[in-house]
Amino acid sequence: MNSIKRSNIFKLIISFVIVFVIGIIGSLVTYPQIATWYASIIKPSWTPAGWVFPIVWNTLYILMSISLFLVLKENLSDKKVKFALAIFGIQLALNLLWSIVFFGFHSIIGGLGVILMLWIFILMNIFVFYKISKWAGILLVPYIIWVTIATYLNYSIYLLNF
């Protein structure tokens, strides 16, 4: 019983580390560009205030971490679990790639392409996690809602700047 609890604690910690390391790397690319390049491009009037983004993303990263943990504590040799974890890994990589492309390379259209792929993989992630743990899937719903808003924002920025 003790080893099960320790194993779950380890998996919970790993879940948070994985998600937040990606988030930190993304913010290292993003943050320096906010006051410079991002400030210089035209944005729609409905763009959320700058202080909203870190609050929302940290909340989403917490939910993603818990969701990942709920799947990690399942049978890791199960093909369904392995597939779900692969989908999670792809969407997490796309999450980071968007920051690199949009903020790092200053590519609004490239960012739009990446965020559209991200949205598709988040949707897939919700479904495959839900099949393993209903809560794991449900906890990702705010993530797809925010990425839907971010996709429209990215699209609007593209229209205003080209």
Image (spheres, grey):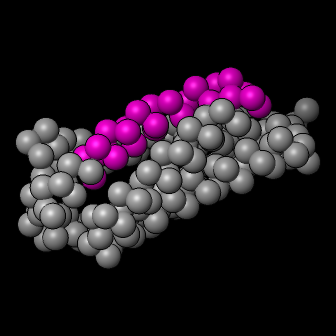
Please state, as top left, top right, bottom left or bottom right, where the C terminus lies in the image: bottom left
- Confirm whether the magenta stretch covers residue 147: yes
* Viewer can see residue 110: yes
Q: Describe residue 88's horizontal placement relative to residue 114 as left or right.
A: right
Q: Position of residue 52 (x, y in %)?
A: 24, 41
Q: Describe residue 68's horizontal placement relative to residue 19 as left or right.
A: right
Q: Nearer the viewer, residue 129 or 117?
A: 117
Q: Read off the magenta span.
A: 130-154
Q: Position of residue 76 (x, y in %)?
A: 86, 46
Q: Describe residue 132's horizontal placement relative to residue 12 as left or right.
A: right
Residue located at (20% from left, 49% from top):
156
Q: Describe residue 78's horizontal placement relative to residue 25 as left or right.
A: right
Residue located at (41% from left, 33% from top):
145
- Residue 35, located in which quarter of the rendered image? bottom left
* Viewer can see residue 8: no
- Confirm whether the magenta stretch covers residue 23: no
Please state, as top left, top right, bottom left or bottom right, where the N terminus lies in the image: top right
Q: How many marks?
A: 0
Residue located at (56% from left, 38% from top):
123
As drawn, 151 above or below 90:
above
Q: Position of residue 82 (x, y in %)?
A: 81, 49
The kind of secondary structure the magenta stretch mainly shows is: helix
As drawn, 114 above or below 135:
below
